[in-house]
Image: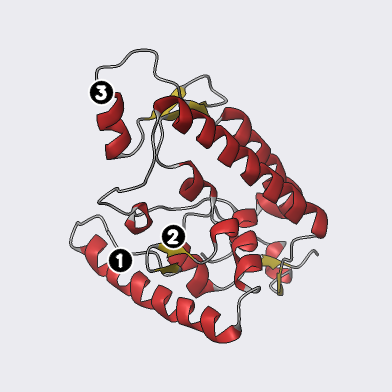
Amino acid sequence: MPIPQGPKEEQCVSMMQKILSFELKRRIAELYSRMENAYDAVARQLNFTCEGCPDNCCDSFFQHHTYIEWAYLWEGLYTLPEAQRETYIERAKNCVIESEAMLGRGERPALMCPVNDEGLCALYSYRLMICRMHGVPSAFMRPDGRKIEFPGCFRCQDLVEGKENIPVVDRTELYRDLAMLEAEFLGHRRHVLPRVKLTLAQMLVQGPPRIPEPC
């Protein structure tokens, strides 16, 4: 993800690791908690649980789209012992190589997340939005008024098949609040930075997000 450099930006090539403030860490943790509560409320209504599922969603090919979640993921990594962190980064490197090879063959990658240990997430409290929301049906309204719907995982789709008035998680407000945190985190730099479209493995391999120094 190279940083675009127009005439002004060419004078601002110095980069820095953007660290989350205590307040932003508190607020994204609070937002993640709201996501969990919204998910759990729908799961209870559907009597849906992951217990006994033959699949593991942690091998899904998820791409993530915000710098603030990328930074918060690294906040979690920095809480781990260095040796454990390096193990996950090495796994991530292999995952990126394998994913690129599969994509090159026209296949959708299905590889275990590099921070998954024996079926459990080692960074559970820091996992990203898509990891938290996948499973139950959900939807959100785009600013242009178009409604985007997600049917849930295959197991949940089987559970609700043929039913009417299926409860869903409304992601609209959650997405809006995440976008507001992203804007606050990046400030004016959000206008020159490329869009994020990275897997968790790529976020580990690239290191914490690096942001242009202000001119």
Spatial CA span between label 2 and label 3 = 30 Å
Residue type at numbered disc 3: Glu
Left or right of 75 on screen, residue 214: right
Which one is in front, 22 or 104?
22
Spatial CA span between label 1 and label 3 = 32 Å
Element at badge 1? helix
Work out whether mark 2 precedes mark 3 in sequence or the reverse, and give the earlier one: 3
Q: Residue at x 47, y 78 (%)?
A: 89
Residue 127 screen position, x and y as percent = 54, 56
Q: Is residue 105 visible?
A: yes
Question: For mark 1, does the 10 Å Cα neighbourhood hold few (<14), some (14 to 19), or many (20 or more) residues?
Answer: many
Mark 2 or 3, closer to the camera? 3
Question: For mark 3, does the 10 Å Cα neighbourhood hold few (<14), some (14 to 19), or many (20 or more) residues?
Answer: few
Quarter of the image where one finds residue 75: bottom right
Quarter of the image where one finds residue 32: top right
Are the two marked residues, 1 and 3, in contact with CB atoms closer than 8 angstroms?
A: no
Are the two marked residues, 1 and 2, in contact with CB atoms closer than 8 angstroms?
A: yes
Residue 163 circle label? none
| Residue at numbered disc 3 | 161
| Residue at numbered disc 2 | 199
| Residue at numbered disc 1 | 99
Q: Residue at x 74, y 56 (%)?
A: 25
